[in-house]
């Protein structure tokens, strides 16, 4: 298990200074909207993923009219104490430290303290474009396989360079197939490996996802995930070769792993069109819990689970199902935010697990 014992915030979002102590199982943060419950969860996410779940612009997480923020957490991980520090100052590079030693690369930290966050913003996985669903795949796979993260970084760098080259060709009215091939080769080398990672991830995730959906919903609907990639139709080299004239015209790379997607379906129709708000939210919660289970098995460590205001639009039965589920042995430390502390406390009292209620004012 990875669990956070204490959290300290300075000038982070709405907090000037705050200290929290948590229990090892279920932690409930209750309070009115706007008090900062979500910001506590986002700080925990930050210490795992080196960035905010809600706002990727680091400077926008600094408290209004201040010059810096600091987030510090003390963890237990596989029986050892881990002290994690994140500091950000305007105009300077973000600092991340593990046990008082600075990381040279932030990517080295990803996967040390795995985390899954469920948020109202997850609705964009259904309503948004493919980029949102690719982010989900990248976030999950990167936490259990560092090689995937490196391949993604190399792929994105090669993609950026190839796009810049295509733009340069157009501006200068030139074309050099040999130079373009250099970046093609780098895209192909990384892209083929990324495709294999994503294919295996989706194949293994789908049955787990279906099971979690049945547990949360009571098995009322049939749900499905389907991975879609251009590489399922042709090999990457052929795709790049066939798209070169279109790429030159549009001045960017129109085909590749950056066009992958996940199809989210219910009863053989896109859930975006066929699912109610409650069904869509159940779908997303089940998808995130399945990803939690996936990371747990791959890393041999229980991630921290962050559930931010997820019970809105859920009936009492589904809320109870979710609470009973995360209170089980297959889940480790859990954080729940809600505006109704009495409601959550009543459900938790029916479980045997340790829990703690913190009122955020």
Image: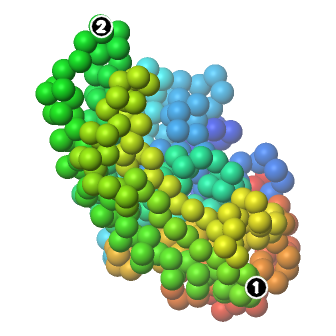
Residue placed under numbered mark 1 in the picture = 220
- Residue 231 appears at what percent x and percent y? 35, 56
- Residue 320 appears at what percent x and percent y? 77, 83
Residue drawn at the location 77% of the way across and 67% of the way down: 275
Q: Residues within 10 Å of mark 2 (few under 14, many from 20)?
A: few
State which quadrant residue 173 falls in. Answer: top left
Instruction: Tell me the CA gap for discs 1 and 2.
Output: 59 Å
Q: Nearer the viewer, residue 139 or 275?
A: 275
Residue drawn at the location 36% of the way across and 46% of the way down: 256
Tell me the element at label 1.
Answer: loop
Q: Residues within 10 Å of mark 1 (few under 14, many from 20)?
A: few
Residue placed under numbered mark 2 in the picture = 172
Left or right of 112 in this view: 31:
right
| Rendered position, 41 above or below 293 | above
Left or right of 7 in this view: 16:
right
Left or right of 119 in this view: 143:
left
């Amino acid at each position: 298990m990875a669990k956070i014992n204490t959290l300290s915030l300075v000038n982070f979002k709405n907090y000037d200074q705050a200290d929290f102590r948590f229990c090892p199982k279920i932690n409930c943060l209750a309070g009115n909207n706007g008090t900062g419950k979500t910001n506590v969860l986002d700080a925990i996410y930050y210490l795992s993923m080196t960035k905010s779940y809600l706002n990727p612009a680091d400077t926008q997480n600094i408290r209004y009219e201040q010059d810096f923020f600091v987030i510090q957490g003390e963890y237990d991980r596989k029986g050892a104490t881990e002290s994690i520090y994140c500091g950000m100052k305007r105009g300077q590079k973000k600092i991340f430290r593990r046990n008082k030693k600075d990381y040279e690369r932030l990517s080295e930290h990803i996967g040390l303290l795995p985390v899954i966050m469920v948020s109202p913003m997850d609705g964009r996985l259904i309503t948004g474009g493919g980029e949102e669903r690719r982010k989900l795949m990248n976030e999950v796979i990167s936490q259990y396989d560092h090689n995937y993260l490196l391949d993604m970084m190399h792929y994105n760098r090669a993609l950026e360079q190839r796009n810049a080259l295509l733009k340069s060709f157009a501006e200068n009215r030139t074309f050099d197939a040999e130079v373009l091939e250099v970046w093609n080769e780098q895209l192909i080398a990384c892209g083929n490996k990324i495709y294999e990672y994503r294919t295996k991830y989706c194949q293994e995730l789908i049955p787990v996802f279906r099971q979690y959906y049945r547990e949360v919903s009571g098995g009322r609907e049939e749900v499905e995930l389907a991975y879609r990639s251009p590489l399922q139709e042709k090999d990457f080299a052929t795709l790049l070769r066939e798209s070169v004239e279109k790429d030159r015209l549009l001045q960017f790379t129109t085909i590749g792993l950056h066009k992958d997607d996940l199809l989210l379906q219910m009863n053989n129709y896109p859930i975006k069109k066929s699912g109610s708000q409650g069904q869509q939210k159940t779908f997303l919660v089940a998808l995130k819990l399945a990803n939690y289970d996936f990371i747990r098995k791959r890393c041999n460590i229980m991630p921290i689970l962050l559930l931010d205001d997820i019970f809105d639009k859920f009936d009492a039965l589904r809320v109870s199902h979710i609470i009973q589920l995360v209170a089980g042995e297959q889940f480790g430390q859990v954080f729940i935010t809600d505006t109704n502390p009495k409601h959550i406390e009543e459900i938790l009292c029916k479980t045997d697990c340790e829990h703690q209620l913190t009122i955020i004012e």
